[in-house]
Image (cartoon, grey):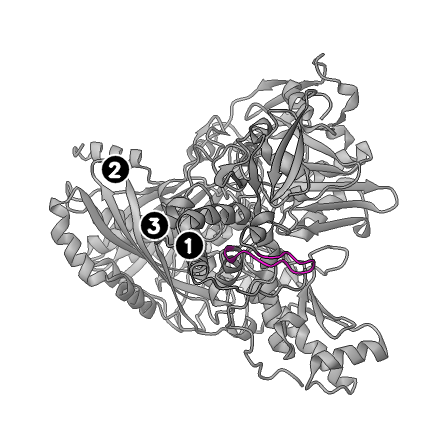
């Protein structure tokens, strides 16, 4: 970032439970700062806060990280898709990630197709389920209305969130679904 | 011989998506997630005008350190300045003339992507503007000739029977109509992106978001004068395509490669949303005119159809989009006399291209909208008119194809009507609507979608699939067919697992990489499950046969593969597409078996129309279809639901606003696709009549849902408003509230 943004700042925050210092221009998008640290699970779909692919939790609230300047993250607690298993109290093992129930249900119920909206969707759904353990179909749709998906028509996404809500209420500890190949 | 009967242990089950966990954990690697050592960023300098002569490009703004930049123009192309597809008319970089807004003129690269963006804006482009063509009518009138001798990329004429005679028959009524569809943006949530790396020793490698690795490969070799083995194309995880990553990635790969070659460093090019929307392909706008001769008892004697597409500035895929739209224009009806004349015309819009449905959504919209008018003209209900004209087993299509299967359209329609509560709701809405501000209506469409390439297409592709044994006894499928969200990895695993009699998890699917996988053809045309899936099945059976012939017991295939490799070395077999006997197609006369088989469907929409806000909303949607054997119920339903949502957007809200050939609303803020709060419940039902052409009887599915949504929705809107002013007519999509309002005004109702 040599020519255009000579000014840099250091922002102290918590990312997925660990203290972190993010460096960059104060007006750099938090989306870029996070991705530059290797947290590439957070995606850019539109860069103008419409699609929600870059949704992260900032102090527990879902925000579009493409609209948040780095400086604003000072002292904040941030959670990206990579931090979801820990948020549900799951241990993350080396070879197979233990999953947050929302993640597990997106796999089992077909909530993820191409997968590019999925991290943002999962984060927004987690925020909903943390404040509303028993949402209605309409409440799920409303909570996810800021996250665009072009693949699913939203049916399987709503089903996934409802299934996760049931599982979380039951306190179930679903095993991660299998993955092989790639 | 093995494989006379295959047990469905995995096909038919909703197993977890193979790459599902990597997608929900954020570990799946999309192109923007990949970084190579020393990588810099590339950007495209584009034309500000629709048509003109380029006088100069100036890189002299004093605020930019130009010496730090890699700059590429048409002169830096080592081979042919052309994006190879069907015609050779589209340059990789404009050289002297431009033919559409946003046409690429030059490329720049720098390690600082912020500075790069400033530099792009600082390039001075001097162009002498020429007048352009911006509509089907302007292209038709040949106000200027911008392509060939007559602005026509391609035209077709299909004739069956004697249309003149049908229209002159005594007692027939003639019903006419004109229908229009707008452009539609694919709007995959991951924009186009590509990384290229160049070295003298290894040649060129590109990694990207793309549907068709071998299309990109075929385009790159002549651009760089390289032999096939010096060009390698790797598909990374791809965040949606819908046709939008069928042909455009060839252009982007060429651009990134030019910058990589000149700079000597890996180059990443990622379009932002605005650039992706204004510069890349969209669904072709269309105009269709229908004249229909129908008897008093509702038998359609003749159809005379004119179908025109706006192809944009270069030929790209317009000829084949037109072909599919033309063949589908007379729908699933047995009409003895048909004439379809069609053309794709050149304009100065950016080239229109592939988008799920590929011409069929346009012509089927017109037909299914028109048939409700025909029904009304002879006093029949919409379902009854269709019932009296459905194609049946042994019936004949417009191209003269005699159907060897029973489409079962009446059963599909009955099912849709039952699931929607058609009879009860029609009666109730008719009673309640006159007093209601928000009026309700029901509409349906019956239609089909041909699976695989049209006519001789699959024969010409002659696709190849491989399967290889791994040392631990598992197997790996080798194909260039890409996973773009639709489930390729999962489906291929299921099909191969059943053919071999092994566990689903014992099959892996190789990443599409032209260095390692054969050309199984493009991931388009609803061909992946049916055509390529069948090749996967055949290859798997051949592998089993090789084991048997070598004397291995195939009761435990995994163990047999392990032992074979340990004792004899590599185990790899291929299968290649062969046209089934009896499939005949005449490319010149456009007659014969257009498709080996079709998916058949009836879609039914329930809408509400608010007569105060003029907003139409879909309240309920029933989609009933026969796609043969359903390989994976959850994925299959997901395909239909996603397609229906795209179709609702196409019908009601997705409008591309044009000004002098340029898209004016290239943002998600003002190009509106349905959200979770807008989309209705979409209820999906399958009938499963197997086809011999696909693995375990499966047909193509991906494009089908786009075809029937928009006409069902607009038929429902007309139904909701039929008590107003003698009935309001809506013949164009997208039907925004503004358009509804204008129709009310014209009808003296607002």
Mark 2, Cα crowd under 10 Å, few <14 / some 14-19 / many 20+, is some
Mark 1 and 2 residues: CB-CB less than 8 Å, in contact?
no
Query: Disc number at residue B614?
Result: 2
Q: Which residue is mark 1?
A: A158
Do badges 1 and 2 share one subunit? no
Residue at point 41%, 37% (across, down) = B655
Q: Which residues are magenta?
A: A90-102
Q: Residues within 10 Å of mark 3 (few under 14, many from 20)?
A: few
Question: Position of B490 compared to B110: left or right?
Answer: left
Which secondary structure lies at badge 2? loop
How much space separates mark 1 and mark 3, taking CA atoms?
A: 9 Å
Find residue B30 and report its horizontal and vertical position in percent: 64, 47
Residue B567: percent from left, percent from top: 85, 80
Cα separation, mark 1 vs mark 2, equals 28 Å
Residues beneath discs 1 and 3 located on the same chain: yes
Q: Secondary structure at mark 1?
A: helix
Nearer the observer: mark 1 or 2; the answer is 1
Please determine if labels 2 and 3 lie on a single subunit: no
Q: Are marks 1 and 3 in contact (CB under 8 Å)?
A: no
Q: Is residue B142 left or right of residue B544?
A: left
Q: Is residue B16 visible?
A: yes
Q: Secondary structure at mark 3?
A: helix
Q: Quadrant of residue B695?
A: bottom right
Q: Which mark is residue A138?
A: 3
Q: Quadrant of the N terminus of chain B?
A: bottom right
Q: Position of residue B126 (x, y in %)?
A: 63, 17
Q: Chain of mark 2?
A: B
For the C terminus of chain B, the quadrant is top left
């Amino acid at each position: 970032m040599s020519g255009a943004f000579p000014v840099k700042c250091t922002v102290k925050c918590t990312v997925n439970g660990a203290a972190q210092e993010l460096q960059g221009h104060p007006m750099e998008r938090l989306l870029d700062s996070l991705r530059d640290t290797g947290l590439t699970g957070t995606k850019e779909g539109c860069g103008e806060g419409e699609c929600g692919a870059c949704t992260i939790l900032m102090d527990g609230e879902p925000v579009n990280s493409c609209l948040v300047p780095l400086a604003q993250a000072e002292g904040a607690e941030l959670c990206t898709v990579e931090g979801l298993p820990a948020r549900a109290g799951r241990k993350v093992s080396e070879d197979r990630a233990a999953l947050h129930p929302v993640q597990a249900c997106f796999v089992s119920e077909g909530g993820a197709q191409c997968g590019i909206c999925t991290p943002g969707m999962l984060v927004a759904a987690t925020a909903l389920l943390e404040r509303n353990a028993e949402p209605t179909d309409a409440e799920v749709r409303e909570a996810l209305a800021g996250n665009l998906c072009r693949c699913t028509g939203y049916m399987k996404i709503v089903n996934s969130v409802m299934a996760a809500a049931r599982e979380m209420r039951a306190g179930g500890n679903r095993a991660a679904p299998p993955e092989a190949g790639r | 011989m093995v494989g006379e009967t295959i047990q469905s242990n995995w096909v038919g089950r909703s197993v977890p998506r193979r790459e599902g966990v990597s997608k929900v954990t954020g570990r799946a690697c999309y192109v923007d997630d990949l970084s190579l050592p020393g990588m810099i960023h590339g950007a495209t300098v584009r034309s500000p005008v629709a048509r003109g002569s380029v006088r100069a490009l100036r890189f002299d703004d004093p605020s930019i350190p130009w010496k730090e930049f890699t700059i590429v123009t048409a002169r830096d192309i080592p081979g042919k300045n052309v994006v190879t597809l069907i015609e050779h008319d589209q340059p990789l970089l404009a050289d002297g003339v431009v033919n559409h807004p946003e046409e690429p003129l030059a490329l720049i690269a720098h390690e600082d992507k912020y500075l790069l963006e400033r530099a792009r804006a600082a390039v001075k482009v001097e162009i002498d503007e020429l007048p352009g063509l911006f509509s089907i009518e302007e292209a038709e009138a040949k106000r200027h000739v911008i392509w060939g001798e007559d602005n026509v990329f391609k035209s077709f004429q299909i004739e069956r029977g004697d249309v003149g005679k049908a229209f002159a028959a005594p007692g027939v009524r003639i019903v006419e109509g004109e229908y229009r569809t707008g452009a539609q943006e694919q709007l995959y949530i991951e924009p186009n992106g590509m990384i290229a790396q160049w070295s003298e020793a290894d040649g060129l490698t590109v990694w990207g978001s793309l549907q068709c690795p071998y299309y990109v490969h075929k385009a790159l070799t002549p651009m760089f004068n390289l032999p096939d083995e010096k060009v390698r194309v790797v598909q990374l995880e791809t965040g949606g395509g819908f046709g939008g990553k069928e042909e455009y990635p060839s252009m982007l790969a060429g651009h990134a490669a030019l910058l990589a070659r000149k700079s000597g460093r890996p180059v990443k090019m990622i379009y932002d949303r605005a650039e992706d929307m204004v510069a890349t392909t969209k669904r072709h706008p269309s105009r269709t005119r229908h004249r229909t001769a129908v008897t008093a008892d509702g038998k359609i004697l003749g159809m005379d159809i004119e179908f025109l597409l706006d192809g944009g500035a270069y030929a790209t895929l317009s000829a084949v989009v037109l072909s599919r739209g033309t063949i589908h224009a007379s729908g699933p009806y047995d009409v003895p006399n048909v004439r379809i004349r069609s053309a794709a015309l050149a304009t100065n819009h950016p080239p229109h291209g592939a988008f799920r449905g590929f011409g069929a959504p346009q012509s089927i919209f017109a037909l299914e909208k028109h048939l409700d008018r025909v029904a009304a003209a002879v006093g029949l209900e919409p379902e009854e008119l269709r019932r009296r004209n459905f194609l049946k087993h042994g019936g004949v299509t417009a191209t003269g194809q005699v159907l060897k299967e029973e489409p079962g359209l009446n059963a599909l329609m009955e099912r849709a009507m039952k699931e929607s509560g058609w009879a009860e709701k029609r009666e109730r809405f008719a009673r309640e609507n006159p007093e209601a501000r928000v009026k309700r209506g029901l509409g349906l469409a019956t239609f089909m979608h041909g699976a695989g390439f049209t006519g001789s297409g699959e024969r010409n592709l002659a696709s190849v699939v491989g399967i290889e044994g791994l040392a631990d006894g598992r197997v790996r499928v080798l194909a260039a067919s890409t996973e773009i969200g639709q489930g390729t990895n999962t489906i291929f695993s299921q099909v191969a697992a059943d053919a071999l009699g092994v566990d689903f998890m014992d099959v892996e699917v190789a990443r599409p990489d032209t260095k390692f996988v054969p050309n199984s053809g493009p991931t388009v045309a609803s061909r992946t499950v049916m055509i390529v899936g069948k090749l996967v099945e055949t290859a798997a059976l051949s592998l089993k046969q090789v084991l048997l012939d070598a004397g291995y017991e195939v009761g435990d295939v995994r163990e047999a593969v392990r032992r074979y490799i340990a004792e004899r070395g590599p185990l790899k077999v291929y299968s290649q597409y062969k046209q089934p006997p009896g499939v005949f197609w005449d490319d010149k006369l456009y007659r014969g078996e257009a498709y080996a088989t079709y998916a058949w469907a009836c879609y039914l929409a329930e809408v509400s129309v608010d007569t105060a806000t003029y907003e139409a909303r879909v309240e309920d949607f029933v989609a009933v279809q026969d796609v043969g054997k359903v390989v994976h119920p959850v994925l299959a339903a997901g395909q239909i639901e996603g397609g229906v949502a795209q179709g609702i957007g196409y019908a009601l809200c997705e409008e591309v606003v044009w000004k002098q050939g340029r898209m004016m609303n290239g943002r998600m803020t003002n190009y509106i696709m349905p959200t979770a709060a807008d989309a209705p419940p979409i209820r999906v039902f399958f009938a499963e009549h197997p086809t011999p052409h696909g693995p375990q009887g499966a047909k193509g599915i991906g494009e089908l849902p786009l075809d029937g949504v928009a006409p069902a929705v607009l038929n429902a809107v007309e139904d909701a408003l039929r008590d107003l002013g003698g009935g309001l007519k809506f013949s164009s999509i997208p039907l925004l509230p503004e358009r509804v309002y204008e129709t009310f005004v014209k009808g003296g109702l607002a």
